[in-house]
Structure formats: C-alpha cells, structure tokens
Amino acid sequence: MHSILQWSLNTFFFFYGLAFFMMGIIILAQPKKGSSFKLADILWLLACFGLIQGINEWLSMWVIIEDRSRTADLVKLCCLVTSFIFLFEFGRRLLIESFLENISKRQKEIARYFGWGIYLVGGVIIICGSISEYSDFWREGNTWARYLLGFPGALLTGVGLFSYYLREQSLLKEAKAKNYFLWSASSFIAYGILSGLVVPKGDFFPSNWLNHDSFLSAMHTPVQAVRAVLAIIITVTVTGMIRIFEWETKKKLELKIERITTLNNELETFAYSASHDLKEPLRAIAGFVGLLEKRYKDSLDEKAHEYIKYTIDGTKRMQELISDLLEYSKVGTKRKEFQPTDCSLILSKAILDLKAAIEESCAIVTYDNMPTIMADASQLTSLFQNLVGNAIKYRSKETPRIHISAERRGNEDVFLVQDNGIGIDPKFKDRIFVAFQRLHTRDEYPGTGIGLAICKKIVESHGGRIWVESEPEKGSTFYFTIPLNASSIAAST
Ligand code: ADP
C-alpha cells in the first residue's frame, strides 16, 4: 500500500513538474513583442515561475525516490523561494500596475512597499530559521516560503486574471480566450490555497494547526493529486490564454490590409477621375493654341511659332501620359469578373491590333498552343499587346522574331514572351516595372514608361507574378504567371 502511494505521488510530481515546465517554455516561445495587451510585458515572470517550479517538483520526485539530502533540500528551497518570488511579483504587477491603473500614486507606493515588505519578512524568517537550532530549517523555510509568497502569489495572480478578464472582456471574447482566463484565474486561486496553505507542515501556527498529522496522512496524496491536476489545467488554460497575441497579430494584419486596400481604392478612383477630368482642359489648351496659330499665322514671328509648337508638343505628351494613367488606374477600378478565356484567341486579337507595327517592322510573331484560363479577357489582351508591342518597339537590327508560349507548372500557368531585341541590363529588371520609369529617351524610343507597370498590375490582380530575364544585345524573355485558381484569388482581394 505504502509503495503504491509512493509511486502515485512520484507520478503526480512528475506530471506536475512537466506541466509547469512546459508552461514556461510555451510562454517564452510565444512572440508578444509590440503587443497592446498589457499582460505581454509581465508574462515572462509567469514563465520563470513555471520553469523553476517545474524543476522544483521534479526535485520533489527525486527526493521521494532517493531520500532527503542536504544538497537536495537546499536546491529545492532555493527553487521554491525563487519560483514563488516570480509568481508573487507577477500577481502583484498584474493586479496593481496594469489593472488598478487608476489608483492614486500613494496607493501604488503602498502596494510597492507591501511587496518589498513581504520579501523582507520572508528573507528574515528564512535566515532566522537557518540559525535556529531547534527547527528543521529546510522544511520550515519551505513552509514559510509557501505561506508568504506562494499562497498570496497565486491568489494575486488569480484575482489579477479575473480583473484582467473584466477589463478586456470584449476583446478576449473576440479572441475566443475569455474562458481560458476564467479557468486559469480560478485554478490559480485553488492552487494557491492547496499548495500554500494545506500541504506544508511546520512547527508554527497555522501550519501546525491546519496540517496536523492525522489530516496530512489522509489528505497528502489526494491534495498532491489535485495540485498536479490544477498545474495541468493552469498550463492548458495559460496556453489558450496567450493565443490572444496570435489573434492580435492576425487582427492587426487584417486591419492593415483593410486600410491599405481602402487607401488603394481611393487612390485609384482619385487617379481615374483626376486623369479623366484633366483631359478636358488639356484639349481646350491644345485647341486654342492651334486656333491662335491659325488665326495669327502672319502676324506672329518665328520665335512665337516655335513656342506654339512646343506648347502643342507638350500638350500632346501630357495627353499621352494622362491616357496611360487612365489606362493604369482602370486596371484596379474597372475589373470584370474572371471568365474562362482562351489565350490563343486573345493573343490573335492582340496581334491583329498590332498589325501596323508588325508590318512596318517585318516582325515574325509566332505562338504555341495556348491554354484556357480564368481571367479578365480585355485585361489579358492589353497585357499581350503591351508585351508584344514592346518586343517590336525595342527590336535590334535583326528582323524581330517574337515567340509566345505557355506551360503548366504546378498550380499555375507560366507564359513566356521571347524576343531577339536590344535586351535589358539585368540591373534594371525591377525598375522597368515601375510606372513612368524608362531606360531610353523619347528621341530613341517613343513611350511614357507605363506599359510594363500596367502589365504588372494586370498580372498581380490575377494573383500572378511577372519578371524578365535578359541581357543587353541578347534579347529578352518576359515571364508571367496566372494561378489556376485566379478567380478565387481575385474575389478575396
Ligand atoms: P515604355 O515602352 O513606354 O518606355 P514600358 O513600361 O513598356 O514603357 O517599358 C519600360 C522600359 O522597359 C522601356 O523604356 C524599355 O527600356 C524596357 N523594355 C520593355 N520591354 C522591352 C523589351 N522587350 N526589350 C528591351 N527593353 C524593353
């Protein structure tokens, strides 16, 4: 019977220690930096309590197996005192510094002195105990540590968690962590009463009165079993409780995305209407300057004609830029629902639109069998038009040869537009996709520098990527991907 009891006691201590040790590790592993939950700043105290208390319980198991020794007693006492200092400090800060924020400065001071007072009294008692010849210092030091630090520490923690719950109720509810707080708060209180007041045996009041021999012989094992269960409950609930940080990070990210999306939409709408509205006055300027030239042709000198020419050129360029900007902002604001789109059909349409440029440059445009994908057909046409148009525009001295192909890689289709043109220095491979970034002057090649930015926006709005592989004089290959589930991606953005 005795050995069964002993064996079960060992098991309880083992799981008890394991539970708290795990709790310490889980708390420390959970990223909490930058959290707006005040709990985040002091949780390390609870983690230290868990780790040290875990070791302490394993030592208790060891002592039962191997019998008491002075060294084991000393280490155990140190572990116990330190772990309870952490628990006490955690509970005290939880309750006072974070959750009774509105108490006066003086009350906070009193609370602080109270904390230090407890540490001081504990220290004095333990030291006095150690120089007293009549007492079993190890056992009584142990008992006093539990009475002075463990019991109030667990109580403060429990009450602190309750008040935390009351304060942050709505947030905790949203994070689905409400019950974890309630459970761990109650478990901490029960744990404090059991391990602080019920178990320790000492030669002084209330230890000798509360835990007399007959009570302990009957209750010791059951109380230890309940403590072990409580430790497991605390670990499970604390683990659940700290999910608030994960939830918070997710929530912050969602909010950020929402804000960026709203901002982006506003910007796109603004760019669209601004460029739309700008067209009108620009047309008026171009028209009136033209009229000016026509009507006063004979009375204007050469310089005036030159200035008028510059003005007309400027307005034309501005019109081009505005049209491109309008085109660019349309990609975001005027997106249609994705439909099954036959890329061969789209490509032949794009090539037809580029007929004049193809004939003029004698370009040879070929393409393989193209897949049918989920896409916005008009955006896809303008994507091919831009890429093939560029391949013609940036041709070398050789006859332009452009080949378009596609292949399925995993859950996406990869499209390739290859040319034998002037090529691009790899150091500009990202810059060319930025709006209004050009590598040439307008005299060398006409353009506004927005074509590839439009391509990028179209591809990204389909959930894909676009990039280029090229070297100067060696032609370029533009790649873009369209995921097979493009329609669901688009719906979620
Ligand atoms: P634009 O053609 O109006 O300048 P784009 O955004 O279409 O604007 O292209 C940006 C830059 O990328 C171009 O100025 C050009 O230097 C480079 N580029 C684009 N396509 C090619 C290509 N097929 N071969 C070589 N350079 C290219």
Image: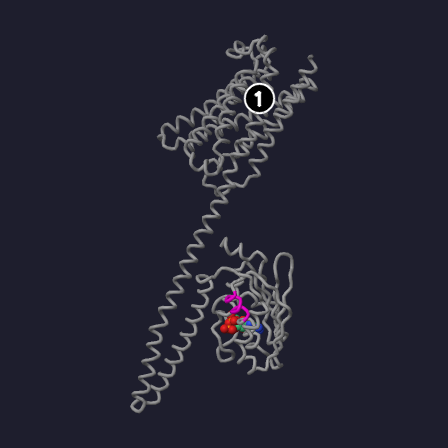
Pick whichever, 104 or 138, lies toward us.
104
Tell me if 146 is positioned left or right of 163 in this view: right
- Picture quarter containing residue 51? top right
Give the extent of the magenta segment.
377-384
Please give the name of the residue rendered at 49% of the width and 35% of the height, measured from the top-left corner: 177
Protein image colouring = one colour
Q: Is residue 29 above or below residue 20?
A: below
Please give the name of the residue rendered at 33% of the width and 73% of the height, measured from the top-left corner: 281
Q: Amino acid at mark 1?
A: Arg
- Picture quarter containing residue 21? top right
Q: Quadrant of ligand 1?
A: bottom right
Pick whichever, 156 or 411, lies toward us.
411
Is label 1 in a helix, a strand or a loop?
helix
**Where is mark 1, residue-wise?**
227
Q: Is residue 211 above or below residue 430?
A: above
Type of secondary structure dominating the magenta stretch: helix
Image spot of residue 483 (x, y percent): 58, 58
Q: Is residue 444 above or below residue 22?
A: below
Q: Quadrant of the N terminus?
A: top right
Is 89 covered by the magenta stretch?
no
